[in-house]
């Protein structure tokens, strides 16, 4: 589904990601894990075509991203940013309907059938009660769900999320990730950046561990997220414990 090959990107003279390669299969929940400045957001922006890498290739279903225009990329990939604000008081239903923009002709507007589909998606995500609310007046967790609804309207195979749980409380963090996980069960491919190793352990099918713009290791979370690997990327000793139900818990070992 997604293949990243020898990807490198520099901001001016500073190398942010350096020859990274990985694959994400259709229907997988993949997680980029690493400290601040490790290259997670830059990698996601390259995959979505927001940034143009100096070297390497990104293939979506075998098609090279370099040969696609913005409209074509938007039909293959949808992205939920970490931060999103709007000046105008759009209704939630209007924000969701904007997801069809890559399929509209210049100057055309979404039709009635688009809004019916938007209503169905809001209901699927259990947020239909927000349809007539002003997008800029709802909570951060609700806005993230609305942006996911807009991404589903985009009808792309690949969903990218940059720190989707940033600024969310404990309850909304797990609620949001459960919904994202359910999307992969319907063959949606998801790649997200996360800070919390325990969230990656619980929800991800594949973990790509980054440090200083390079991949330390990648694979199934239960095999890659060892105490030693976590120590290497975060520069802190950790304790990895198995608790009831076979769940692993990562705990920082502080002085």
Image (tube, helix red, strand yellow):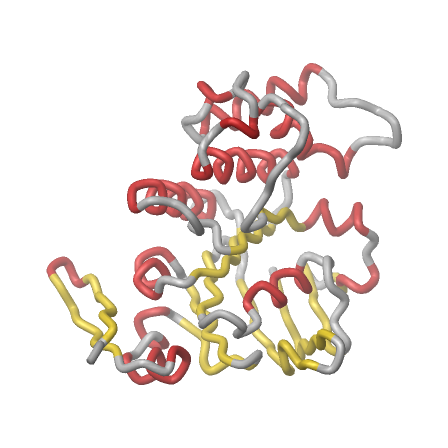
Q: How many marks?
A: 0
Left/right of residue 204 with respect to residue 65 in the rendered view: left
Quarter occupied by the N terminus: bottom right
Q: Is residue 235 above or below residue 59?
A: below
* Residue lying furthest left: 244
Horizontal and vertical percent position of residue 5: 66, 76
Left/right of residue 71 with respect to residue 154 in the rendered view: right
Q: Residue at x 78, y 49 (%)?
A: 72
Q: Is residue 113 above or below residue 35?
A: above
Of 251 and 181, which appears nearest the observer? 251
Horizontal and vertical percent position of residue 91: 60, 21
Q: Residue at x 47, y 50 (%)?
A: 164
Quarter occupied by residue 19: bottom right
Quarter occupied by the C terminus: bottom left
Quarter occupied by residue 18: bottom right
Horizontal and vertical percent position of residue 121: 52, 28
């Amino acid at each position: 589904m997604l293949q990243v090959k020898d990807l490198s990107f520099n901001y001016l003279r500073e190398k942010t990601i350096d020859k990274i390669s990985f694959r994400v299969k259709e229907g997988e929940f993949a997680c980029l894990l690493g400290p601040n400045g490790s290259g997670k957001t830059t990698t996601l922006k390259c995959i979505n075509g927001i940034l143009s890498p100096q070297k390497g290739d990104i293939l979506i279903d075998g098609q090279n991203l370099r040969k696609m225009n913005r409209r074509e990329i938007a039909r293959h990939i949808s992205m939920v940013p970490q931060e999103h604000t709007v000046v105008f008081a759009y209704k939630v239903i209007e924000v969701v309907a904007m997801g069809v923009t890559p399929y509209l002709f210049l100057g055309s507007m979404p039709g009635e059938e688009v809004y019916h589909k938007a209503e169905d998606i809001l209901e699927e995500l259990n947020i239909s009660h927000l349809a007539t609310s002003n997008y800029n007046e709802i909570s951060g967790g609700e806005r993230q769900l609305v942006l996911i609804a807009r991404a589903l309207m985009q009808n792309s195979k690949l969903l990218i999320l940059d720190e989707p749980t940033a600024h969310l409380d404990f309850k909304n963090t797990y609620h949001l990730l459960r919904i994202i996980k359910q999307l992969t069960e319907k063959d949606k491919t998801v790649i997200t950046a996360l800070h919390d190793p325990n969230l990656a352990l619980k929800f991800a099918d594949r973990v790509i561990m980054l440090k200083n713009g390079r991949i330390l290791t990648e694979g199934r979370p239960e095999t890659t997220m060892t105490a030693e690997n976590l120590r290497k990327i975060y520069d802190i000793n950790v304790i990895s414990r198995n608790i009831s139900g076979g769940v692993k818990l990562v705990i920082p070992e502080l002085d």
